[in-house]
Amino acid sequence: MKKQTLDVENLATARFDCVFPTCGGVCCKNGRPSVERDEERRIAKHLAKFLPHLTPRARARVEKSGFVTARKKEGLPMLAVVDGWCVFANEGCVLHKVGASEGDRFRYKPWRCAVFPLEKNPKSGRWHVRQWGVKGEAWDLFCLNPKESPKRAERTLAGELEHAAKLAVPSVSPKRR
């Protein structure tokens, strides 16, 4: 099978280096990604795997009210937040850790989280690496500051680029509600 490639507008100039755990997983703080229906179902189906790993307050929230909010973004529900953090954040992403322990770090993560800091413009369908000063980026995460890393995003984001390319294939592209 031919490897998919992804057209990323600023890939030639983008710099990015994830420094987790040094940053504490700050991308999971107030990020509130929207969640596709199939992603919501997949997380719900495997929720019992995740619950023991959540913080006590996040677990209580999820058990009482679920892991998504009624609030919408791009017409989709968003992951819930407790104390400013995604309910699945606990010294890293619980969805990531459980998936990685099963051999696929992307298995349970919503695609918007899995490919961070890549972002797809919903209108044009084009991708870019989120960076300060690109497309009006306002999130002040230091990892989005290209001056903070000499590392080229095309190298440091190889796994995310490959995963996003699979999402860009029409037959596996995330579906809208």
Image (tube, helix red, strand yellow):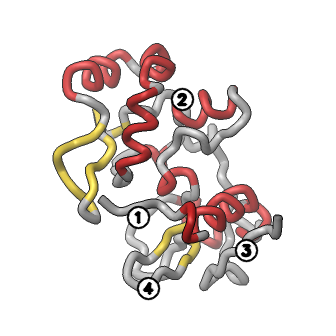
Q: What is the number of the mark on residue 5?
A: 3
Q: Quadrant of residue 54?
A: top left
State left or right for residue 14 relative to residue 129. Answer: right
Disc with the residue nearer the chain's start (1 vs 4): 4
Please name the residue shown 42% across and 74% down the image.
137
Disc with the residue nearer the chain's start (2 vs 3): 3
Q: What is the number of the mark on residue 139?
A: 1
Q: What is the number of the mark on residue 91?
A: 2
Residue type, numbered disc 4: Ser
Please name the residue shown 52% across and 43% down the image.
109
Residue 161: image location, x then y, percent: 68, 64
C-alpha gap between disc 3 and disc 1: 27 Å
C-alpha gap between disc 1 and disc 4: 21 Å
Please name the residue shown 38% across and 82% down the image.
123
Please name the residue shown 69% across and 26% down the image.
101
C-alpha gap between disc 2 and disc 3: 32 Å
Residue type, numbered disc 1: Trp
Residue 99: image location, x then y, percent: 62, 33
Numbered disc 1: secondary structure:
loop
Q: Contact (CB < 8 A) between labels 1 and 4? A: no
Numbered disc 3: secondary structure:
loop
Residue 63: image location, x then y, percent: 27, 19
Residue type, numbered disc 3: Thr
Which residue extends farthest left? 70
Q: How many residues crowd mark 3 within 10 Å: few (<14), some (14–19), many (20+)?
A: some
C-alpha gap between disc 4 and disc 2: 35 Å
Q: Nearer the viewer, mark 2 or mark 3?
A: 3
